[in-house]
Image (cartoon, coloured by chain):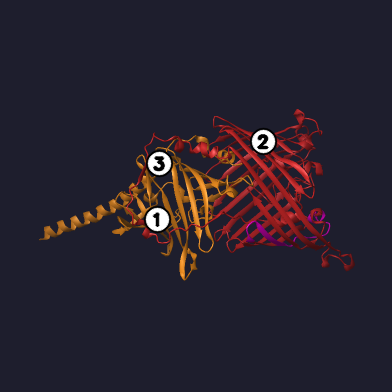
Chain colours: A orange, B red
Amino acid sequence: MKRFFIIIVLILSGCVFGYAQDFKAMLVTADALVNFPDSDFSAEYTIAREVPKQGLTSTSCVIFRRDVEKKYVIIVTEPKINKGQGYLKIGDTIWFYDPESRRFNTSSSRERFQNSNARNADFTESTLARDYDVVKGEKVMLGKYDCWLLHLKANNDEVAYPVMKIWISDDGLVRKAEDYSLSNQLLRTTAVYGYQKVGTKYVPTKVLFLDNLAGAMVEGKFVHEKTQVTITKPSLKKLPDSVFSKTFLESTSR
Amino acid sequence: MRTFCLIVVIICLPLSLSWAQETQQLPEDIDALFQDDTPPKDTKEPGDETAENSDLLTQVVMQDNFSLGADFLLVGGYSPGLNYLPYDVSDPSEIKYQDKFIAKLNSSVSLNVRFSPEFRVFNKISARLPELELEVTELFCDYTVADTVFLRLGRQTITWGISRNYPFTNLLARLPADATDNNESADSFAFKMNIPIGTGGLEAVAFTRSSFWIPSDEPAADEIGYGGKLNLAFEFADINIGGFYHKDMDVRFFYTVKTTLFDSLEVYTEGLLAMEQAWFIDPETRRIGFSANAGIYFDLFSRMLEINAEYFYNGEESDPDQLVKGDLFPMFPGHNAALNVSFALFDRKFKLLFQGKYNITENSGVIIPAATLSLFPHLTFTLAVPWILGPTDGEYSENNEENDNRRISLILGIVLKGSL
């Protein structure tokens, strides 16, 4: 009886250990599916921002990414008033080029992109496995998707959100995320509701960011500020090295 | 004559940007988005990229292969003011009231033609009232060699340095010590070559101004200045070192260092070594000066509050009037301090602003508290109170012609601005 009890305990602890391993592996897979360590990546992004009572505004831009060197370049193409503005990110530092003043400013990747609910960090490679530890996981349904809901806690203070919940569907893709403060205040909800496949990799087609703190009462109901990102024309073609330079930003602007 | 007087510049303090408004609505119920189990759309395999997708880079570069642009700025207003402050004078009868009407209009059209990803031409022509003068403000061509060497030739604006309060390292905008109105409005011409090195790169320029040579003549070889800068863009700091030589000006070398601390505090410092050209012949008797600054910039509450503070030591004692093209006041020798604060409310439609510059050495300064209101597209209302501090023979008081030498004034203005 005693031996049987020990075997049961060992099996159960093995299961628990196995689950913990699986959760981390899930994050690794989720990152790997949307990152491009072996190629460059470029795509066109359309960012629509809706502020209740103020209407919808939109920005279009083109993104060039080189994940292996932790770099990206964003060139704003619409609206015309912001056309030619550019972002160059190397590591955690971002250079912002303003064609009107013809000057570069540096900023943090935690900052919001073009005053939207998307952050500069949302355009870079996914680093869930590196930056977060899984506190617990549970099986849930998200609409028609069977998902693992993982509760994450940041293991460093470099990330924008110290606590996260993410929904990963059976195919390993992140479908939804909730970003929290340290005091567990829900700050932002993200829905990735559509992917496109590029070779063996996946690129979201539409991402919706909902600001859980900002919004306004409309007809007796609280409506949040939202930003929707639509991604088109993804490509894995190799880019010239000069694209990831300040000179390129200056030369593509007016 | 400077392009715009102090009043116009004050009225045009940060104007809000407006985005194109659309009517479509974004979904509010996040979970409802996942009711359809849509499999990922297969876009393409690697190596099978269509011309459309693989040429995104060319598309960005060629996005404006032919385009027309236009800018319009109308500034109108009224400004009463006093030539003395009541506590400045023993005899109040010396105080004179002076008011003025403000009307400025500036319009420009531009033509951008890109013949290929490597070659484009840009031309911008501006007209302004009340001068009614047409001016080619920009006319240059770009040529790129093998995605590695970027050339620009023609009339163009090149900006070096960081500080907007004291642009002493913006060497190509520095004017000769005996600068005249002719120098200040002079056209600039440059050949610029950029070679990316890592994230930063090398920039070499050959530069001159129309006032540096005899009108209606072509510049001689020795009337062209030469310089360059090397940008080292590291993750921890953005560093520039460079220099510029022109026979009519001191030889100047500069450095700039900028970094971001704690993810939000921008810190910068710049330094400048200026040497009289004769110094190279006789260092004992010729002057040499060193200037440096240090400044911070940070914003809080999603850029609702923006603060910039800077200290500047100007060691170029030889040039009492150190002019920078486009700047309202010269840079004064000695110790200087500047503070800029912007507080924006109601989605940046209403702003409270403060600009202040103070020359500690001369006990002279200027402060400009202001407010702007942008209720309607393209239209901004401005209220500002420029106030000269310190003695009447102080530097800021004596270089205040742009505001008709008024010690204090009230400016009520309207700005109508559009860009296409």
Q: CA distance from mark 1 to mark 2?
A: 46 Å
Task: Characterize the local packing of mark 2: few (<14), some (14-19) or many (20 or more) Cα atoms within 10 angstroms.
Answer: some
Task: Characterize the local packing of mark 3: few (<14), some (14-19) or many (20 or more) Cα atoms within 10 angstroms.
Answer: many
- Magenta stretch bounds: B375-399
Residue A159 in the image: state x and y as whole percent.
44, 54
Which residue is denoted by mark 3 in the rendering? A36
**Residue type (three-letter) at the residue carrying disc 3:** Phe
In this rendering, is residue B279 above or below B108?
Answer: above
Residue A68 in the image: state x and y as whole percent.
43, 40
**Which is more toward the observer, B125 or B226?**
B125
**Residue type (three-letter) at the residue carrying disc 1:** Ala
Residue B324 in the image: state x and y as whole percent.
74, 45
Secondary structure under the numbered disc 2 in the rendered image: strand
Q: Which mark is residue B140?
A: 2
Does residue B56 show up?
yes
In the rendered structure, are the residues bearing label 3 and label 1 in contact, judged by CB atoms less than 8 Å apart? no
**Residue type (three-letter) at the residue carrying disc 2:** Phe
Q: CA distance from mark 3 to mark 1?
A: 21 Å
- Say whether residue A138 is left or right of residue A119: left
For the point 48% across and 38% down, the residue is: B56
